[in-house]
Image: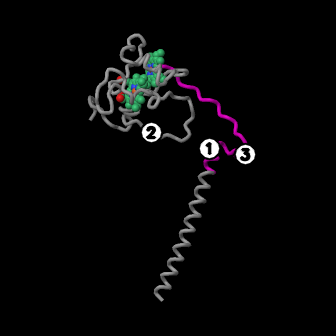
């Protein structure tokens, strides 16, 4: 008697597994359909009209950072700047030696430190490919709403402020 009950339980479990599996398939199909909506409700057999290319913001105004350790955004055009093993156009302005003539902000001291913490005379290999961290900004509509609030707007007093 008991073993029969156990058998029935097992069948129940198997049915449950199949149902869960089907639910997972349905969910992924739903997700795929959502993905289709991102391309603008166009059937996959047709080619949607391409959105206009966003314009780069190249007003030369340095942007405030959202947090202290953020790699600052690039406020100028980098169109056609070569950045390869042999040539680094960015460094021709941002390297310590060249900042006097270029007027560009110097890459900070962290860019000269290796991952072992050793200070080099030249840019550290791990900071060589600038655009791995620094990005220009495009004048584009955000795909999802952004509710980010800077900490200074959340009623946090600063060191040096008089208000209590
Ligand atoms: C012709 C010189 C020149 C070149 C080449 C150049 N920059 Fe700049 N960069 C500047 C100047 C000058 C500024 C200061 C803001 C401005 O005038 O645009 C600046 C600002 C920046 C800033 C903002 C710094 C901050 O504190 O806000 C970043 C990041 C930056 N550049 C990254 C790059 C990267 C990455 C490259 C290569 C793809 C590059 N730059 C190539 C001259 C240059
Ligand atoms: C691994 C990520 C990374 C790479 C690669 C990198 N940076 Fe940075 N950069 C940062 C971060 C993070 C900061 C801000 C904190 C700091 O100074 O370390 C910064 C700061 C800067 C600043 C502002 C310095 C200051 O004192 O305000 C400039 C200019 C800059 N980087 C230029 C460059 C250039 C040019 C290159 C390529 C040669 C480069 N960075 C490569 C992460 C990176």
Nearer-N-terminus badge (3/2): 3
**Is the image coloured rainbow, by chain, by secondary structure, or in one colour?**
one colour
Name the secondary structure under disc 3. Answer: loop
Q: CA distance from mark 3 to mark 1?
A: 15 Å
The image's mark for residue 38 is 1
Are dots 2 and 1 in contact, CB under 8 Å? Answer: no
Most distant residue in the bottom direction: 1
As displayed, is residue 106 above or below residue 146?
Answer: above
Task: Report which quarter residue 69 is drawn in.
Answer: top left
Task: Report which quarter residue 102 is drawn in.
Answer: top left
Name the secondary structure under disc 1. Answer: helix
Task: Say whether residue 136 is magenta.
Answer: no
Say which residue appears at 59% left-offset and 52% top-offset. Answer: 31
Crowd rating for badge 2 (residues with CA inside 10 Å; few <14, some 14–19, many 20+): few
Most distant residue in the right direction: 46
Magenta-colored span: 33-60
Nearer-N-terminus badge (2/1): 1
Ligand 1 location (quadrant): top left
Task: Say whether residue 58 is magenta.
Answer: yes
Q: Is residue 80 visible?
A: yes
The image's mark for residue 45 is 3
Q: Which residue is mark 2?
A: 148
């Amino acid at each position: 008697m008991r073993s029969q009950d156990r058998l029935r339980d097992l069948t129940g479990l198997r049915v449950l597994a199949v149902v869960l599996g089907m639910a997972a398939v349905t969910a992924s199909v739903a997700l795929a359909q959502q993905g289709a909506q991102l391309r603008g409700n166009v059937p996959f057999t047709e080619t949607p009209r391409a959105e206009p290319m966003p314009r780069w913001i190249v007003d030369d105004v340095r942007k405030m950072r959202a947090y202290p350790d953020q790699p600052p955004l690039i406020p100028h055009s980098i169109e056609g700047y070569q950045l390869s093993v042999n040539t680094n156009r960015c460094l021709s302005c941002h390297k310590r030696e060249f900042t006097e003539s270029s007027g560009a902000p110097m890459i900070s001291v962290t860019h000269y430190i290796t991952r072992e913490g050793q200070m080099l005379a030249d840019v550290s290999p791990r900071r060589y490919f600038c655009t791995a961290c620094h990005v220009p900004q495009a004048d584009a509509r955000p795909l999802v709403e952004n509710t980010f609030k800077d900490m200074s707007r959340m009623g946090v007093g600063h060191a040096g402020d008089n208000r209590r």
